[in-house]
Image (cartoon, grey):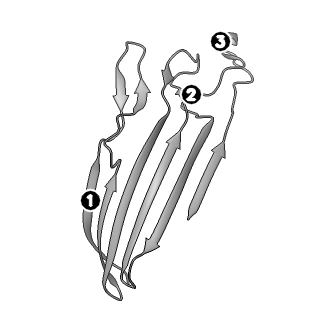
Amino acid sequence: MKSRYLYSSPHITESRDDSRLQGNRLAQSPKHSASVTLSWQTTSRWRNTFQIRYVSRQFEDDANTLELDSFVVFDWSTTITLQNDLDLFLSIENVTAAEFETGRAGNGIVSIGAPRLISGGLRWQR
């Protein structure tokens, strides 16, 4: 199991263009982000990975008026080794198809993160 956590609290210390920005948080900079990854091998050839990702609320703009919600996303993948250098894999990002904000414009338009993404294929390593 691997876990990662980042605490980041960057603030604008000076603004020549707009002194009202001083002290505000930087745009697109969540205070907390974390992930936990659990990997297990069911047989000598079959591996599974489950990951949870969390990002706390953040602001879209330097004025800190456009707020983006926090979100949690689940990912899963499985890999089967066919030969020493050849793997077959299946990966699903955002398993629950959670809708999460990645951007917000001043006119109210909200950008949404990628929905469920399923990919698979063969991976050959030399």
Q: Amino acid at mark 2?
A: Ala
Q: Amino acid at mark 1?
A: Ser
Q: From the viewer's perspective, is 112 left or right of 22?
A: left
Tell me the distance, in whole angstroms, between the alpha carbons under discs 2 and 1.
31 Å
Give whichever of 24, 18 is nearer the camera: 24
Instruction: Give the numbered dot on residue 18.
Output: 3
The residue beneath circle 1 is: 119
Taking the spot 36% from the left edge, 89% from the top edge, the residue there is 84
Going from N to C along the chain, the mark reached first, 2 or 1, is 2
Taking the spot 45% from the left edge, 72% from the top edge, the residue there is 40
Taking the spot 39% from the left edge, 77% from the top edge, the residue there is 42
Instruction: Give the numbered dot on residue 27.
Output: 2
Taking the spot 31% from the left edge, 56% from the top edge, the residue there is 92
Tell me the distance, in whole angstroms, between the alpha carbons under discs 3 and 1.
46 Å
Q: Amino acid at mark 3?
A: Asp
The quarter of the rendered structure image containing the N terminus is: bottom right
Percent from the top left, x then y, of residue 30?
A: 58, 34
